[in-house]
Amino acid sequence: MALRARALYDFRSENPGEISLREHEVLSLCSEQDIEGWLEGVNSRGDRGLFPASYVQVIRAPAAEPPPPARYANVPAGGFEPLPTPAAAFKPAAQQPPPAAAPEPFPLPPAAGFPFPPAPYGGSYQPSQGSDDDWDDDWDDSSTVADEPGALGSSYPDYEAAGGGASGRYRMSTRSELSLGSRGGHPAGHPHPPGGGGGGGAKSSATVSRNLNRFSTFVKSGGEAFVLGEASGFVKDGDKLCVVLGPRGPEWQENPYPFQCSIEDPTKQTKFKGMKSYIAYKLVPSHTGQQVHRRYKHFDWLYGRLAEKFPVISVPHLPEKQATGRFEEDFISKRRKGLAWWMDHMCSHPVLAQCDAFQHFLTCPSTDEKAWKQGKRKAEKDEMVGANFFLTISVPTGPGASLDLQEVESQVDGFKAFTKKMDESALQLNHTANEFARKQVTGFKKEYQKVGHSFKCLSQAFELDQQAFSAGLNQAIAFTAEAYDAIGDLFADQPRQDLDPVMDLLALYQGHLANFPDIIHVQKGALTKVKESKRHVEEGKMELQKAEGIQERCNIISFATLAEINHFHKIRVRDFKSQMQHFLQQQILFFQKVTQKLEEALHKYDSV
């Protein structure tokens, strides 16, 4: 029997060694061995590589040929155990053997019950790997939370966190690196044995079940533990995140002290007596007026902390890293514009703008290394993360403040369809704009200058006549040639004014759209627990009070999710209105310049 799997969802490969999947596609597996949540196999197109284990359902079908040998044969034997067969993974509790003391093997991903799979990358964010100017010096040399014993909170001894655990990537003990599917946080422990763990006070042995996939976003974010009532902690008033009812439904409470922050004057600086170079950006927050200088690595650290702390908030993605050409003027200018968009979205978000880590980033003096490290350590030791984060969310109470679960599910499903369509259209527009800009810089410029050169050749031919009365005509034709040459230059320069800003905005929103599958997955996971608890109450297996507690905690996640969706639509309308106005204004100015060049050439013939 050849080992096969059926794809539950579409998956698009983005890194070397990965392959794309289509929903319902049948694949041949090279091995049952799960490599940090990834499997190796061959898709229907004959491509071979890795894909997320949670995106497929393992099946067995007869085949004439044995499966191909596993390419990753050097995985340490002690680091992983084989996946259980589907039958073993879904045995009733009564048939399960008693749990052993040793760590359990990785369980199979759940069947197609969850409407959203865990994202394989956590958006485009990747921790710095030494390819940028970022994590190669001394400011992160002291121990952090990620370095402390037991910081991972996991029973996997062969993992160590990379980049403080905020990025959602982990390294095997052999240092062979593979991406994991998360927006941030540490891997949760193994599932509790059947009938154990705080499912919430059933009348009989029935409890709300736990997700088999312990690497799902719902589990890793702490959403599952919170919904099941396992979170406990003291929430200070300053940590509370308030959701209010606005005209469009749940909204984040507005920041009472809104501010902006400019990013200016990127300058090349050195350290270690000139041996190390980097680019520093000047930040000037409007609420302090005090400038600070930050490197890209500081932005990178902040993004990692925020992505880990706020699982139901879309933290905007940073501009991409670049291994070479980091000191070229075009790259520095493009990065500054990308960081400016990032900063605008951070300051515009009522929750992110008031976060202690963000305020420390904006206000800590650049020259006070001790104060910076203290604030950095404080952010990394924040206790209001994971399941405890959801304790900080304060939602409306009283008459008219409750949410209808079916309506919430309908709204979230509608937004899911919207984000999918927006992502497709943004990708198409970005491709079209990039191709059009390329044509303007190369093709259009070249064609207009060819026309100008042809007119110049005609003018030079006419000059051979050496007749005095034709001199005016010769000069007018020569001026026409220069006009067309200048128009070619205008075409080449124009994308910087109109198309590039549009593509910068699209890149920022593609990062947001990559965040929402995980956010929706957390909310969907909570709804699933509510439905399961209601079923247990109807069957007389769970106390009504326990089920109501699960629903109340699910409402908190639903309020936060709907508030984030409303905020996204609000800034989307603001940003695209402003950017489209800018685009059309620049287009008008461009064609006015072209018309002016042609009119100047036309007037040269008036005196001939």
Image (cartoon, rainbow, N blue to C red):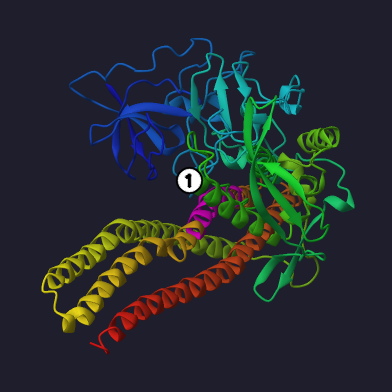
Judge by depth and name the residue closer to the eye, 74 or 194: 74
Q: Residue at x 35, y 77 (%)?
A: 597
Residue at mark 1? 113
x, y percent for residue 386 = 71, 40
Judge by depth and name the residue closer to the eye, 400 or 306: 306
- Residue at the extreme left of the image, as rendered: 465
Magenta range: 505-525
Can residue 484 be seen in this snapshot?
A: yes
Magenta highlight on residue 534: no
Q: Amino acid at mark 1?
A: Gly
Q: Secondary structure at mark 1?
A: loop
x, y percent for residue 342 = 61, 54
x, y percent for residue 451 = 20, 67
Q: Principal SS element in the magenta part? A: helix
Q: Quadrant of residue 409?
A: bottom right
Q: Residue at x 34, y 40 (%)?
A: 21
Q: Quadrant of residue 608?
A: bottom left
Mark 1 surroundings: few (<14), some (14-19) or many (≥20) residues within 10 A = few
Q: Residue at x 34, y 67 (%)?
A: 486
Quarter of the N terminus within the rendering: top left
Q: Is residue 276 above or below residue 245?
A: above
Question: Left of 24 or right of it: where is 155?
Answer: right
